[in-house]
Image (cartoon, rainbow, N blue to C red):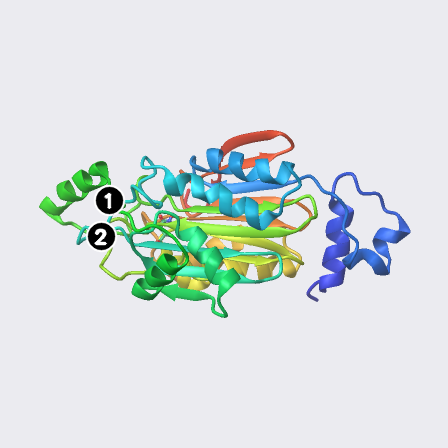
Amino acid sequence: MPTTRRQFITQSLIGTAGLSLSPKILGQNTLTEKKAVEPLVISTWSHGIPANEAAMKILQDKGKAIDAVEAGVRVPEADPEATSVGYGGLPDRDGNVTLDACIMNEKGDCGSVAFLQHIKHPISVARKVMDETPHVMLSGEGALRFALEQGFKKEDLLTENAKQKWEAWKKEADYHPWIYDEHNHDTIGLLALDIQQDLSGACTTSGLAYKMHGRVGDSPIIGAGLFVDNEIGAATATGVGELVMKTLGSFLIVELMRQGMTPQKACQEAIARIAQRGDIKRMQVGYLAVNKAGEYGAYALRPGFEYALYHKGENKLYEADYLQR
Ligand code: SD4
């Protein structure tokens, strides 16, 4: 029988380090009473280390998870060396840097932008969509117009380095988005648990390098690249977006945690679901998940998926376990 929400939360709280089994914890007030918990930030790839740093600073100042996740992912968005996020991202096959991002808070509110050009911080535009409009998602020209109305600056995001790589690629124009290449799959997905025990997440990317003009991946799709349910947990994805979209991976992971799986087991199950669908040779997908109790998980289709975890005073890079041996 699936675990009910109340059972899950009670079990999670029992599992939280430092919480005693007082009758109060097990009683009626469980859902409304908030205990200060150890904050946690987890994010994809090595650019997660400086992103976690920025996010944790906010959490340590007793800030909210939603502000932490936005501040965190803005770090790689602004970094020209991060060639798969924001400024400096590798362009599509026509030389346009097109960005996808989404954000989700503890109330289940979310905002997203897809196929956005010329704006360095798509995550902050996504936040504005969440906070300032009745909608969840804006795309292309409309997203750009909204960003400019909100005071964002129009910029050229194609750096000299990215332009040179694109020009080198054009000589062959050989397009294999599915082939795993360590430089082609570096979306940042970042999840945070604040001291109020609230969860939020953010996900931002320039998508697959040399993609078709107009292609949108999983990263701005709520439930695919990111999902947060503050009563259960949160999950985010990186890798070949088409595989994540076909299985709605992040939503699936949160639902599996709702049924009682640990974050690790839920990530494994979501990766297995992708593998069951067909040939995944040389393709990469990586998932991260965290639950309300601050337990986390990470799993990938193949070796090489790194994630950064900032917890209990340490911000470290780890390599996730994987399916394809
Ligand atoms: C996408 N998931 O657009 C993204 C690509 C990526 O790490 O780089 N992920 O499909």
- 146 with respect to 40 (left or right): left
Q: Kindly tell me whether residue 298 is visible in this rendering.
A: yes
- Mark 2 or mark 1: name the one nearer the start of the chain: 2
**Contact? badges 2 and 1 (CB < 8 Å):** yes
Residue farthest along the right direction in this orientation: 23
Label 2 sits on what residue type?
Asn
Q: Is residue 197 above or below residue 49?
A: below
> Mark 1: which secondary structure?
loop
**How far, Cα to Cα, is label 2 from label 1?**
7 Å
Residue receiving disc 1: 158
Q: Is residue 43 above or below residue 27?
A: above
Label 1 sits on what residue type?
Leu
- 299 with respect to 113 (left or right): right
Q: Name the residue nearer the viewer: 150 or 164.
A: 150
Q: Position of residue 41 (x, y in %)?
A: 57, 41
Q: Position of residue 99 (x, y in %)?
A: 33, 53
Please give the label number shown on residue 96: 2
Residue at 43% x, 51% y: name it.
123
Residue at 53% x, 51% y: name it.
201
Q: Position of residue 234 (x, y in %)?
A: 57, 53
Residue farthest along the bottom direction in this orientation: 134
- 81 with respect to 223 (left or right): left
Crowding at dot 2, Cα within 10 Å, few <14 / some 14-19 / many 20+, comes out as many
Q: Name the residue nearer the viewer: 324 or 121.
A: 121
User: Which quarter of the figure is the N terminus placed in?
Assistant: bottom right
Please give the label number shown on residue 253: none
Q: Position of residue 258 (x, y in %)?
A: 64, 60
